[in-house]
Amino acid sequence: MERVKRMFLCMVVVAALLLSIAVAVPHPMQKGKAMNNEAKMLSPSGEPSSNGALRVPIRVVHSGHGFALKEDDEFHVLRVHITRVRHLQPMYIRGLMAKGLNIKEIRAEIEKQRGQYFYRGYLRLGEKHYRLVNMSVDADVQEGTRVFNADIADRLDSTGSIAGHISIAVMRYEGLWAGDGNLSMDEGEYTGEYRVLLTALPPGPR
């Protein structure tokens, strides 16, 4: 237990240093750009999905990194990243731009809509990358916690096979946000049951 506590405290210090130096500075869009370029700025890839709707990330709802630990002292580096994505029809975006709205105003209008959205995420365990599927996000406003549950699938697997499951509760811990939970892997080189300890960014809206 003391070893786990020491490892977690070291992880918190390293994460705090990384967050203090890795601040992203947004670059304002130059005036006079074409409307198509503006639409691309609202899309993560600038490309429509197969049904013609733009896929626009609304928020990063969870981003954390730390360790997955077994009871026998085996542990592996772990990173979890979850984004909420919403489908938007191109005609809707063009209509907003035709009103002369800037990017900030368009984003505000998008936030007001109740269109369909879904969660998309990935997990890195050791040196292997996975997709997160069947995700759910539940918040406890009174406790100030948020719980993430997801099945784990191989990044390149298209058969729908599930390789494991992860559950993380994100909460305040000594002035920082931390994640504590469980990870089970049913196949592959990392098969087993793990406890999860992560530092995390402050949770965004669901």
Image (cartoon, grey):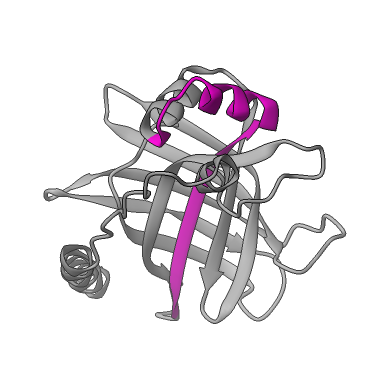
Write the residue at 35% across / 61% down.
197
Q: Residue at x 34, y 60 (%)?
A: 198
Asked whether 15 or 1 is in front, the reply is 15
The residue lying furthest to the right in this view is: 159
Image: 123 above or below 145: below
Number of callouts: 0
Q: Give the x, y percent position of residue 41.
A: 50, 47
Q: Quadrant of residue 35?
A: top right
Q: Give the magenta-colored segment's residue range.
A: 75-103
Q: Residue 204, relative to residue 121: is it above or below?
A: above
Residue 89 appears in view? no
Residue nearer the viewer, 119 or 77: 119
Location of the C terminus by quadrant is: top left
Viewer-nearest residue: 113 or 178:
113
Q: Quadrant of residue 79?
A: bottom left
**Could you say where residue 15 lies in the image, as x and y percent from the top left?**
23, 67
| x and y percentages locating residue 9 in the rendered image | 18, 67
Say which residue appears at 42% left-offset and 61% top-offset: 196
Residue 202 seen in the current view: yes
Viewer-closest of 164 and 104: 104
In magenta segment, residue 38? no
Quadrant location, the N terminus: bottom left
